[in-house]
Each structure stands twice: as structure tokens, then as C-alpha cells.
Amino acid sequence: MMPAENAGSPSEHAGSAQPRAGQNWTILARLVRTQGRRGEILADILTDFPERFADRKRLFLVSSETSGAAAREVQLESHWLHKGRVVLKFSGVDSINDAEPLRGLLVAIPASERSVLADDSVYVGDLIGCEVFDLNASREVGVVADVDRDAGLLVVKTPAGEEALVPFAKAYLITMDIAGKRIEMRLPEGLLDINAPMTDEERRETNE
């Protein structure tokens, strides 16, 4: 499998099919805050191909990838990249007051509209929610909460509620069942300890 930083994120050809109830979504961006006075909104980019926003005008605003709530269809009027993020301007959103309620929503397309990837690629969004198992230690590492695409790391929430960074590399990957939300890996001994939180004793020593 291709490491996460090289996995194709969605930016596919627009379709005419209407989203159904319980629709699964492919996420392109997360709306962060208003930008300017004419309804523009700054967003975190969650696709590897932000330049293809120019090819897709029909988008949807949802609260999560599996949101059962009604999605809001929007038309992308214009966009531009800004300091690693993207500024989006939707038709009909023409003021700060119009844009403010959209803060925190996700910009999405129906998952059925995304392109088919090569056999050795995986959508970053499909990794979210997968359980990661370390076969070497015969234990569950945790659930993928996020992906650091630049570093090629799975951000995993452990059963203890802590955060572990797991390299998403072919050398460690054994099997990946996206449908079953399970990733099996053989991680080097001690790898997870590198990112383990400090103990109380270690904190005391650091503060001395």
C-alpha cells in the first residue's frame, strides 16, 4: 500500500446524483473561520489535490463523514490558496453574517463520486476510524483519529485515551481491511514508547 502522504485524496468529476439519507461523504476541506467581508471562508485542506477545486463547483456542507443530517448543497463561486489553506467563496454567502454559521462544517462530495485509485493507494479519509493492531506485540494500538500526510504518520488514539504516532509505511504494514476498518502492522519494538507521554516522575525530573 502507498504511504498516507502519497495516497490520493478526493477531487473527482462532479456528478448529478442527489445525496441520499445516511450518505457517506468524502471530505475535501474543513471550514475554519470567515476571511474578509464578502462571505469568504478560510478552510483547512483535506485533499492532496487542492488545485482541482477549480474543476468542482457543486459541493456539500456536512457535519461529519457519515452525517445523517441533511446536507447543504453549495456552489463554489471562487477559491484561492492562502498560507497552506484555501479560501472558499460560495454563491449566496455574501457577508460575514452569512459565513459565520458555516464555521466548523466540512466541505464534501458523495463518496460515490470519487475516482478509483491505483491498487497501491488509499484515500486518507478511509483510514480514519480504522483500528490499528500491532501483530508483534499482539495488541491493539488504537483507532486512527487523523493522518499527518506530510510526515506519513497515522495519529492514533490509544485505548488509554492518549495519542500515538504510527508510521504508515510498507515496511510495517501487513494487511489493511478498509471495509472492516482494521489495519494490521508489525511495528519495531519500542517504536510506540518514543511517543509515549511522560510519567509523573519524568515530569518532575524535567522541571528540576
Image (cartoon, grey):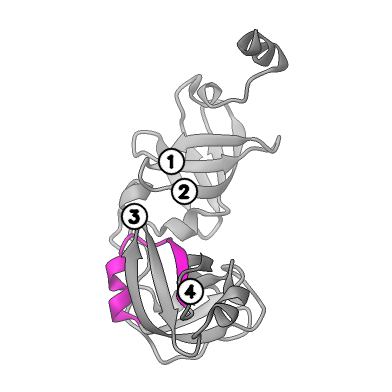
Badge 3 marks a residue whose secondary structure is loop
Residue 28 visible here: no
Of marks 2 and 4, which one's residue comes earlier in the chain?
A: 4
Residue 108 visible here: yes
Q: CA distance from mark 1 to mark 4?
A: 23 Å
Q: CA distance from mark 2 to mark 4?
A: 18 Å
The amino acid type of the residue labelled 2 equals Val
Magenta residues (range): 40-56
Q: Position of residue 120 (x, y in %)?
A: 30, 53
Of marks 1 and 3, which one's residue comes earlier in the chain?
A: 3
Q: Position of residue 114 (x, y in %)?
A: 38, 74
- Name the residue that disc number 3 marks: 7
Q: CA distance from mark 1 to mark 3?
A: 12 Å
- Name the residue that disc number 2 marks: 147
Viewer-closest of 167 and 101: 101
Q: Is residue 52 magenta?
A: yes
Where on the picture, by quarter, is residue 66?
Answer: bottom right
Badge 1 marks a residue whose secondary structure is strand
The numbered mark at residue 49 is none
- Name the residue that disc number 1 marks: 153
